């Protein structure tokens, strides 16, 4: 077990050097202490157990159990390290369970996350766990062959308890998710999650019945076409670092001709969740189990189904494989007539964008063919791009030098290609003579982190780089307008309904249309992992609540868009408490609504 303890300490040292390169000696030890304590605890635990159990057969059983558990812990330590180095987050029980449940769909993702070093460590862990007892068993047995005194056994048991308690301790200023040893973090995650949302903060108001939502046509208005473009992993241009040339010239120009909020935000930085918010105007299931793809997983009435009742044809195209996150099922639950994934498209001449999709222009011809079948009927056409998703690979594309950081530059090149696709869609509609009769809703699903706050990718990145997204409603017949304050994806569905000449009727209280001039109210952004983090935006201020993992943070995202100056020490404590209670209450109400439905 000693090599496993050393492995855990060594890998944590690597992570500290990666994410906290300027840590003092004291800070370094605080972040390392849990791994040291757990390694000592795990080895001493089995020594003490073997001192209490004297019968050879009992000892043999215990050694076998220890061998198996130690191997599993070693595998988890290595996989957690690989995941943390990629994302800045630890693995949770829910994520591990999801990886097993959807192993086939996520195989490409898993392969992209595991490099040769990780494979080598995993092989070493398995071989050592299997062979070490055979090689060293007799020698180790001599150390515990004698009869230990009652006092020494009690001292050993007490030391084991002390080490276990030490393994669960973290400094108040340190992130527990980072500092705790992986096995300890895995064990305490369900406890933290269970205590993150106090039930007394849940609202007691009656929940709306979504079955009664309908569209009411406004008299004398032409019901035009609608195109929704959801841009994969596309953070707002305002969150980009300084670049040597513009990354999104198409979107920048289009925003000046559109209805655009000052700041647009995702509801939960995960693609399938954002698709629900965008197309339904309501919160997605707030879980990490992809339940929006389950049968009956979306009981609310969404825009595709509502428009279909008004005679619209509806289609959803994506440049990713259909199996990723069971997208076909989610799209069906949203109410689309037709779903076309990249699996059903001709990829000749198109470059792979990453491990599960092709460059987005691959969707243009299939979409054009579908439009030819629609005839005179109005339509809803929804595109989901994939180019911006990690691992940002475009092997046949000549890279542009935007920034000096290689990984970030790859991402910005992918976003540049994604931006070009938006321009190609607009041009296609002009060529087909459909542009003037079409409203375009263009938004990101979420952003993407590159270590700005020691987080990479998106699922649990609620800082601006992960939460703030491009968002606009482009109507060729409407003058451009900038909407004050923060706006969330929830506002897009009612705005689209308004732009098409309908009113929403029913029990559900939707966000106001961006055309209405009504205030949008506070914005809540939740992490994908339950109880990990949440953010509340109220005017210029943003509170990030960490659920006890570490102290909360407050930023003025207008004057400090990169969130470098934490204002928590000078911010009104009552406002902070009200803000995080708003976020918790919202989350509990959404959970209660889905449970009831």
Image (tube, rainbow, N blue to C red):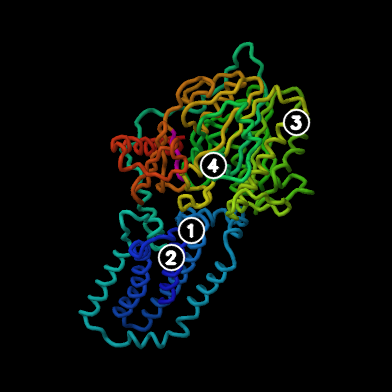
Is residue 102 visible in the rendered image? The answer is: yes
Q: Nearer the viewer, mark 2 or mark 3?
A: 2
Q: Nearer the viewer, mark 3 or mark 4?
A: 4
298 w.r.t. 342: above or below: above
- Secondary element type, mark 4: loop
- Secondary element type, mark 1: helix
**Residue 8 % position (x, y):** 43, 69
Q: Alpha-carbon distance for marks 1 and 2?
A: 10 Å
Q: Residue lying farthest left?
A: 151
Is residue 296 visible in the rendered image? The answer is: no
Residue 571 occupies quadrant: top left
Please tell me how crowded label 3 is: few (under 14), some (14-19), or many (20+) other residues with Cα within 10 Å: some
Q: Which numbered dot is residue 12?
A: 2
Q: Which numbered dot is residue 446?
A: 4
Circles 2 and 3: CB atoms closer than 8 Å? no
* N-term-proximal mark, 2 vs 4: 2
Q: Alpha-carbon distance for marks 3 and 4?
A: 28 Å
Point out the stretch of residues depicted in magenta.
523-527
- Secondary element type, mark 2: helix
Query: Quick one: quadrant of the N terminus?
Result: bottom left
Question: Which residue is tagged 1?
Answer: 84
- Give the left or right position of residue 17, taking residue 326 as reference: left
Q: Residue at x 75, y 48 (%)?
A: 350
How many labels were placed on the picture? Answer: 4
Q: Which numbered dot is residue 178?
A: none
597 is within the stretch colored magenta: no
* N-term-proximal mark, 2 vs 3: 2
Question: Which residue is tagged 3?
Answer: 371
- Give the left or right position of residue 161, taking residue 533 as reference: left
């Amino acid at each position: 077990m000693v090599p496993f303890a050393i492995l855990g300490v060594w890998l944590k040292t690597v992570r500290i050097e990666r994410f906290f390169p300027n840590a003092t000696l004291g800070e370094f030890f605080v972040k390392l202490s849990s791994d040291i304590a757990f390694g000592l605890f795990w080895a001493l635990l089995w020594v003490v157990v073997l001192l209490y159990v004297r019968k050879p057969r009992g000892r043999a059983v215990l050694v076998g159990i220890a061998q198996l558990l130690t191997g599993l812990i070693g595998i988890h330590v290595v996989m957690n390290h690989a995941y943390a180095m990629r994302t800045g987050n630890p693995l949770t029980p829910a994520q591990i369970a999801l990886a097993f449940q959807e192993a086939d769909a996520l195989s490409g993702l898993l392969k992209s996350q595991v490099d040769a070093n990780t494979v080598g460590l995993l092989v070493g862990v398995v071989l050592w766990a299997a062979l070490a007892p055979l090689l060293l068993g007799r020698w180790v047995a001599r150390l515990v062959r004698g009869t230990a005194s009652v006092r020494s056994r009690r001292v050993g048991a007490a030391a084991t308890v002390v080490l276990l308690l030490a393994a669960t301790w973290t400094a108040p200023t340190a992130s527990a998710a980072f500092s705790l040893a992986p096995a300890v973090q895995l064990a305490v995650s369900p406890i933290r999650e269970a205590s993150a949302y106090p039930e007394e903060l849940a609202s007691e108001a009656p929940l709306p019945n979504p079955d009664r939502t309908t569209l009411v046509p406004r008299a004398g208005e032409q019901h035009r076409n609608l195109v929704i473009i959801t841009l994969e992993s596309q953070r707002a241009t305002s969150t980009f670092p300084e670049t040597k040339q513009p990354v999104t010239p198409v979107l920048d120009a289009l925003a000046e001709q559109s209805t655009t909020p000052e700041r647009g935000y995702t509801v939960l930085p995960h693609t399938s969740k954002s698709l629900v918010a965008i197309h339904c105007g309501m919160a997605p299931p707030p879980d990490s189990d992809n339940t929006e793809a389950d049968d009956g997983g979306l009981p609310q009435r969404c825009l595709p189904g509502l428009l279909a009742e008004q005679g619209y044809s509806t289609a959803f195209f994506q440049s990713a494989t259909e199996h990723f996150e069971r997208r076909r099922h989610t799209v069906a639950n949203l109410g689309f007539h037709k779903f076309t994934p990249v699996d059903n498209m001709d990829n000749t001449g198109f470059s792979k964008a990453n491990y599960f999709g092709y460059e987005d222009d691959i969707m243009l011809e299939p979409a054009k063919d579908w439009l030819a079948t629609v005839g005179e009927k109005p339509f809803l056409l929804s595109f989901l791009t994939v180019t911006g998703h990690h691992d940002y690979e475009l092997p046949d594309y000549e890279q542009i030098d935007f920034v000096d950081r290689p990984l970030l530059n790859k991402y910005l090149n992918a976003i540049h290609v994604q931006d070009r696709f938006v321009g190609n869609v607009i041009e296609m509609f002009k060529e087909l003579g459909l542009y003037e009769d079409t409203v375009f809703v263009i938004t990101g699903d979420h952003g993407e982190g590159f270590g700005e706050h020691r987080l990479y990718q998106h699922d649990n990145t609620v800082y601006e780089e992960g939460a703030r997204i491009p968002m606009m409603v482009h109507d060729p017949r409407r003058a451009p307008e900038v909407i004050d304050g923060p706006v969330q994806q929830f506002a897009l569905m009612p705005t689209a309904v308004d732009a098409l000449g309908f009113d929403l009727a029913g029990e559900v209280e939707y966000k106001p249309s961006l055309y209405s001039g009504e205030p949008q109210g506070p914005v809540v952004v939740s992490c994908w992992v339950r109880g990990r983090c949440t953010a509340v935006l109220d005017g210029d201020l943003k509170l990030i609540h960490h659920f006890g993992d570490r102290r909360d943070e407050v930023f003025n995202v207008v004057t400090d868009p990169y969130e470098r100056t934490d204002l928590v020490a000078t911010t009104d404590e009552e406002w902070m408490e009200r803000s995080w209670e708003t976020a918790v209450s919202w989350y509990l109400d959404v959970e209660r609504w889905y449970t009831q439905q």
